[in-house]
Image (spheres, rainbow, N blue to C red):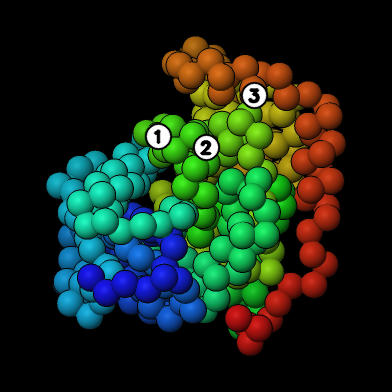
């Protein structure tokens, strides 16, 4: 494998039937000013042309590897994190066996196209601030040639296009097989004193809406179930319901609350990690005010297509 001192990060991408998105996504990674030391693409039992695309990528780039998981029913609770964890576990072992050094670990969904200095900009922020544990860029959508950012708290990294500092990743028990593993990783990082950040001027363009892998309704029902699963306070659930209900498509607030209420009525199983449950159960008005402040402080100007 060719070596480059600037390649300081590992990258993991789960992919299932991504023949439409994978060529453009892989091109955006290949043209990064700071390329990954190793990119592991996990083929989650694809039945389309994804395996053929991966073979071509591995032939073309020595720093790309792939593993294939057997086909299995797709769910939107534990399965995604299971697929990602296979990639992280494989990459860590591969680096040990091949003496590959790295400072950061990244996760990129197969529907996210990156600006050419995406990871270079994030690494620059990490190197400025030794307390920064997890960071990401902003998630944008191409709306007829103009980019529109998906509004979210600037202090919370997005799931796709995120980087963990290696020490933070290991200290927070790595990537766990849980629903919403990124939120759990964020929480554990906060509890251990790490700083989190989302940089809106670092651009990742998603070709699908967040939580839309199984349709938006199912995605937000799952988010409501997740709120119950981690034992979020009722105040936080009601705030999220209102927040989702005030932005298009407006039915997502109903879907979210339905997912939470259904789980509460059924008294479904909650996460066993008491550190996580205590954190979410104790979220009060102070946290809500800080979250509102984080959302409202988003950049008022969003970059156009040509600014990538």
Q: Position of residue 12 (x, y in %)?
A: 36, 56
Tell me the SS state at disc 3: helix
Residue 176 disc label: 1
Q: Are marks 1 and 2 in contact (CB under 8 Å)?
A: yes
Q: Nearer the viewer, mark 3 or mark 1?
A: 1
Q: Please give the name of the residue rendered at 58% of the width and 48% of the height, measured from the top-left corner.
A: 134
Alpha-carbon distance for marks 1 and 2?
8 Å
Position of 264 compared to 175: left or right?
right
Q: Quadrant of the N terminus?
A: bottom left
Q: Quadrant of residue 121?
A: bottom right
Q: Position of residue 261 (x, y in %)?
A: 58, 23
Q: Please give the name of the residue rendered at 69% of the width and 69% of the height, measured from the top-left corner.
A: 201
Q: Can residue 150 be spotted in the picture?
A: no
Q: Quadrant of the C terminus?
A: bottom right
Alpha-carbon distance for marks 2 and 3?
13 Å
Q: Nearer the viewer, residue 123 or 248?
A: 123
Q: Please give the name of the residue rendered at 65% of the width and 46% of the height, measured from the top-left corner.
A: 131
Residue 185 disc label: 2
Compared with 4, 262 (above or below) is above
Residue 280 disc label: 3
Disc 3 crowd, CA 10 A, few/some/many (<14, 14-19, 20+): some
Q: Position of residue 34 (x, y in %)?
A: 47, 73
Q: Earlier in the sequence, mark 3 or mark 1?
A: 1
């Amino acid at each position: 494998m060719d070596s480059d001192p600037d390649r300081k990060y590992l990258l993991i991408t789960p992919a299932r039937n991504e023949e439409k998105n994978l060529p453009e996504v892989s091109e955006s990674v290949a043209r990064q000013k700071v390329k990954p030391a190793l990119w592991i693409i996990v083929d989650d039992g694809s039945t389309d042309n994804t395996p053929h695309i991966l073979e071509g990528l591995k032939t073309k780039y020595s720093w790309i590897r792939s593993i294939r998981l057997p086909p299995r029913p797709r769910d939107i609770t534990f399965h995604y994190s299971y697929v990602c964890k296979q990639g992280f576990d494989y990459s860590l072992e591969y680096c040990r066996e091949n003496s590959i050094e790295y400072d950061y670990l990244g996760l990129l969904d197969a529907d996210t196209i990156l600006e050419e200095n995406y990871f270079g900009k994030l690494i620059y922020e990490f190197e400025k601030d030794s307390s920064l544990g997890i960071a990401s860029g902003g998630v944008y959508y191409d709306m007829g040639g103009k980019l529109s950012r998906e509004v979210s708290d600037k202090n919370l990294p997005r799931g796709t296009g995120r980087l963990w500092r290696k020490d933070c990743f290991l200290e927070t028990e790595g990537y766990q097989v849980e629903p919403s593993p990124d939120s759990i990783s964020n929480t554990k990082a906060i509890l251990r004193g790490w700083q989190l950040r989302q940089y809106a001027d670092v651009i990742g363009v998603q070709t699908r809406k967040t939580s839309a892998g199984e349709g938006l309704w199912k995605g937000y029902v799952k988010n409501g179930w997740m709120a119950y699963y981690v034992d979020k306070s009722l105040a936080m659930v009601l705030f999220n319901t209102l927040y989702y209900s005030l932005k298009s498509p407006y039915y997502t607030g109903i879907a979210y609350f339905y997912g939470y209420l259904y789980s509460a009525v059924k008294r479904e199983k909650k996460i066993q990690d008491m550190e996580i449950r205590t954190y979410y159960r104790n979220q009060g008005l102070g946290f809500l005010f800080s979250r509102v402040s984080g959302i409202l402080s988003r950049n008022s100007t969003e970059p156009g297509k040509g600014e990538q």
